[in-house]
Amino acid sequence: MVTINSIKKGLVIDHIGAGLGIKIFKYLKLDDAEFTVALIMNAPSYKIGKKDIIKIENEIHLDYKVLGLIDPNITINVIENEVITNKIKLSLPEKVKNVIKCKNPRCVTSVEKYIPHIFHLVNEEKREYRCEYCDDIERFEEI
């Protein structure tokens, strides 16, 4: 078994579905980080069988809505002095802006490029979102 040292101050993104950790790692551009980061893949999990974990020894801004879209089962642990000071449980966001793009060629967002793409969750199980302008339904597949 491999031991990953604890972090003094930063974030631990936990309960990431196995295989999604690398996508989140790249989305957060952690491969360019100048601080300590660890990506642990296929770690054993009692809840989900196997999971990925990302440890970040730094304070960074995370877009919880996007992370919730990628994997709504994620837990963010905020670490200070090697102790978890806050746990944030993510879920699918009810509303997203400029994350999903409307594919309807007749949608106003296709013509007017300055209008933000706004979607509302309509089916949590299928991860379907409805465009605020044209009511087109889009599925969030991956970032």
Image (spheres, rainbow, N blue to C red):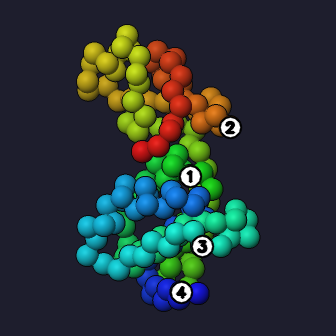
Q: Is residue 57 above or below residue 116?
A: below
The mark nearer the N terminus, 1 or 2, is: 1
Identify the amino acid type marked 1.
Asp
Q: Is residue 115 left or right of residue 119?
A: left
Q: Which mark is residue 71?
A: 1
Q: CA distance from mark 1 to mark 2?
A: 12 Å
- Nearer the observer, 18 or 38: 18
Q: Which mark is residue 88?
A: none
Q: Which SS class for mark 2?
A: loop
Give coordinates of residue 29: x percent, y percent. 31, 61
Nearer the observer: mark 2 or 3; the answer is 3
The mark nearer the N terminus, 4 or 1, is: 4
Residue tagged by mark 4?
A: 2
Residue tagged by mark 3?
A: 43
The answer to whether the residue labelled 4 contacts the one labelled 1, judged by CB atoms less than 8 Å apart, is no
**In the rendered image, is residue 12 in sight?**
yes
- Nearer the observer, 21 or 117: 21
Give coordinates of residue 142: x percent, y percent. 47, 43
Give coordinates of residue 110: x percent, y percent. 31, 18
Q: CA distance from mark 4 to mark 3?
A: 10 Å
Residue drawn 57% across and 79% down? 84
Q: Is residue 66 above or below residue 135?
A: below
Identify the amino acid type marked 2.
Glu
